[in-house]
Image (cartoon, grey):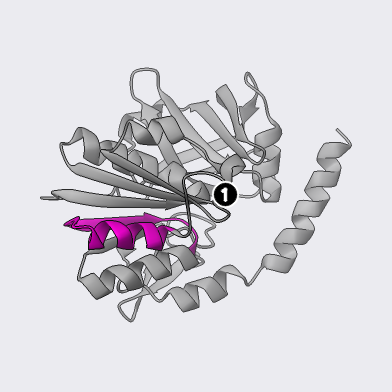
Amino acid sequence: MFLITKKKQLNENTVQMTIKAPHVARRALPGQFIIFRTHEGGERIPLTIASYDRESGEVTLIFQTVGASTSILGAKQEGESILDFVGPLGQASEFENETRVAVIGGGLGCAIAWPQAKFLHESGVEVDMICGFRNKDAVILEEEMKNSCQNLVLMTDDGSYGEKGLVTQGLKKLIEGGAKYSRVIAIGPPVMMKFVAALTKEYGIPTTVSMNPIMIDGTGMCGGCRVRVGGEYKFACVDGPDFDGHAVDFDELILRNRMYAEQENHHREETCNLLKQG
């Protein structure tokens, strides 16, 4: 069993949770993920590691309570435990000889973009962060992101906070304003990453995206997380989650991610009803 040591509600649907998992904390690196199960018979769900503390042996996750298993996890409190916490899984992010990097996060993707930016910033790389949210109420980790870059640009769909518009508009404005990026890192919904990659391809800027497709075992055995990259299939759990954004077939990825939407909605409704009943 794995103890929940801290819990913080970041907004209505987003939870920051710290788990005591010394073996994961000792080996974790930016870009890697874990797979958890809350209880026997529960789903195996991947979540990217937001941060880790090797001394305390703790790992922090940030997630939205959008599905059945994340709703069950989000309902747990400090002092309670979960059954499984496996990791670190996947390949750690690799950054070499970077000079100035734009790290782009969309919604919950900012929770994954933030540790990437923090790692680069602490390594002496000049970092700009461009983060997009639906509205002011959806904004998370603003202070943490400010402390992990030289320049933070916040975008909201409705203009209720920061600048109104999409992250691609914020990125284009910086590029055309003279920013010379050695790399762009985009983490968020597949549609967002698709259009960021399309924009950076126009300017010839290498672009890394983080994939979070359907995943079950985290070992490459099930094939559920396959992603077509450069005409070949890769497994996000063992080959990724980072890939060349200019080589990913985003259209196929988006279609595959929608395959089980009906079943997921049904399961989520059942779980919500059970949680309400206590």
Circle 1: residue type: Ile
**On the rendered structure, is 114 left or right of 223?**
left
Residue ranking furthest to the right: 277
What residue is at 33 percent from the left and 46 percent from the top? 129
- In the image, residue 151 above or below residue 196: above
Residue 13 place in picture, x, y as percent? 65, 41
Assess disc 1: are there few (<14), some (14-19) or many (≥20) residues with their C-alpha within 10 Å of its C-alpha: some
**Which stretch did the figure color magenta?**
167-190
Could you tell me if residue 33 is visible in this image?
no
Q: Nearer the viewer, residue 7 or 21?
A: 7
**On the rendered structure, is 13 left or right of 225?**
right
How many marks can you see?
Answer: 1
Could you tell me if residue 62 is visible in this image?
yes
Q: Per the image, is 182 magenta?
A: yes
Residue 239 place in picture, x, y as percent? 33, 61
Q: Which residue is mark 1?
A: 45
Q: Nearer the viewer, residue 236 or 112?
A: 112
Rendered image quadrant of residue 277: top right
Quarter of the rendering occupied by the N terminus: top right
